[in-house]
Amino acid sequence: MRATSALLFLVLIIGCGKQWGAPDGPVTLRFAFPGENEELKIYTELIRTFEEKYPRIKIKKEFNPGKGYHEKIKVRMAAGSAPDVFTYDDEPFLSLVSRGMVLDLSSLIKRDSYDLDSYFEQNVKLVTYRERIYGLPLGGGPQLLAYNKDLFKEAGLDYPREGWTWEEFLKICRELTADSNGDGEIDRFAFEVSGWWPYFLPWIWSNGGDVLNQGKTESIINSPETREAIQFYIDLKRKHNFAPSGSQVSDRWGKMFPLGLQAMKPVGPWDIPRLKEEVKFPWGVVVYPRGKKGSFLRFSGPCYAVWKGTKHPEEAWKFLKFASGKEGGRILAESGFFLPPRKEIANSRVFLSTPSAREFLEAMELARIQPIIPQWYEMSGIIKKNMDKVFQNKETLTVALEKIDSQLDNLFSQEEARRPGMD
């Protein structure tokens, strides 16, 4: 009887071990990520070093260049054929988490005493949902303004510095906007105005406004502070002509700054490698100008996550810890593609030797994460649909914000009634 009980106990242990991917044979993990050649080089090196350290685990790359990556991942999850591990941008990440598609890492983090305090707080918030952790930080950073030093010199202007104000920004824009060839048409612009609403956020925050309340359960986009900030931003283009229209840009969208036709441009750390290759003039970066409540920066950053349906959760967790850990973090830091999420690596000589690294690091004190909710796509669609009419002069900002405010609150009410929530 004792022998039978002991054998049964051993069988149970072995069975549990196999269920969680015990090291009894080689394992292949599928790892998906988007991007271009720069990202492919980074992740190829990451995989090579991981497989050297853990030869039992092989990583199959699933590189997804071009558009549609996030939707592809979602479709594969629904079909039960998703990659074991994947990277995902912060904005749509909670849409996966809230639908139970992503592995909750909280118990693994607790079991391994994994130190989340080594990361920047902003990165950890982006992978947290209802006090549970669903990913590990990959990178990211705050968005700053790149500026063309030659154009500032030509206009007799000092380079912008932290602490400059909205008023000073307007004066600088006025000096930088010009008809350089004398044909009566403006052909050199100071700035660019994007219709994508997250680009409104630094202006909104610095004016004391926001898009959602602190609990992210109610719209406050129609508050006086937010309305004033968005109007200021829109006027840079429509009233002052400091930013080009679509017809003035034509097929040069995204190229105006490298071509020397635009003096300032919003950039994140992910833009720096490309600027380094494309821009032939001296340039620098600076924080956004200060409004009534100070200067604040939009922080964005992707993460590593594990599909809930993976058959190899332990191996996937091991890969996540490596990729997001010190070894993987150094590979990313050498590229300068993101601000490393680990504070130790972000402050290392490896990262600080890359262009503009110190400015992005110091700017983290002003960085805020975006108002991200599980209904990100729906919320963005509502804001875009109404703001497009404003940019097209088909509707006033006041009317558009009233509609957005009402439609967002209706979205939240419907979602609350439809989805009881995650346990």
Image (cartoon, rainbow, N blue to C red):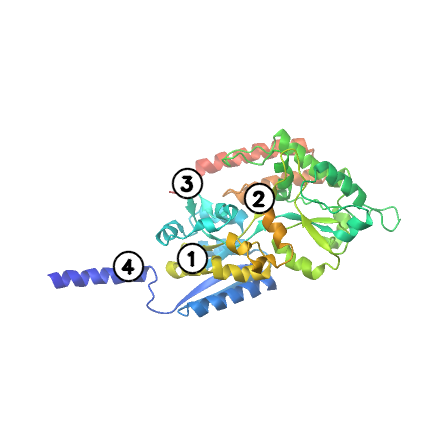
Could you tell me which secondary element the residue under label 3 belongs to? loop
Precedes in sequence: disc 2 or disc 4 = 4
**Which circle, 3 or 4, is nearer the viewer?**
4
Task: Pick the residue in front: 299 or 286.
Answer: 286
Precedes in sequence: disc 1 or disc 2 = 1
Estimate the spatial distance between the alpha carbons at disc 1 and disc 4, rounded to whole Å: 23 Å
Say which amino acid is labelled 1.
Gly
Q: Is residue 365 above or below residue 11?
A: above
Question: Would you name the residue on which mark 1 appears?
Answer: 80
Precedes in sequence: disc 3 or disc 4 = 4
Q: Are marks 3 and 2 in contact (CB under 8 Å)?
A: no
Could you tell me which secondary element the residue under label 4 belongs to? helix
Q: Residue at x 73, y 53 (%)?
A: 257
**Which circle, 1 or 2, is nearer the viewer?**
2
Question: Would you name the residue on which mark 3 appears?
Answer: 421
Query: Which residue of the protein is positioned furthest toward the top in this rendering?
Result: 224
Question: Would you name the residue on which mark 2 appears?
Answer: 365
Precedes in sequence: disc 1 or disc 4 = 4
Q: Is residue 289 visible?
A: yes
Where is the N terminus found, in terms of image quarters? bottom left
- Residue 369, image quadrant: top right
**Which circle, 3 or 1, is nearer the viewer?**
3
Say which amino acid is labelled 2.
Glu
Question: Would you name the residue on which mark 4 appears?
Answer: 16
The circle on residue 402 is none
Query: Which residue of the protein is positioned furthest toward the left in this rendering?
Result: 1
Precedes in sequence: disc 3 or disc 2 = 2
Say which amino acid is labelled 4.
Cys
Estimate the spatial distance between the alpha carbons at disc 3 and disc 1, rounded to whole Å: 22 Å
- Residue 315, image quadrant: bottom left
Q: Is residue 415 left or right of residue 149?
A: left
- Residue 390, image quadrant: top right
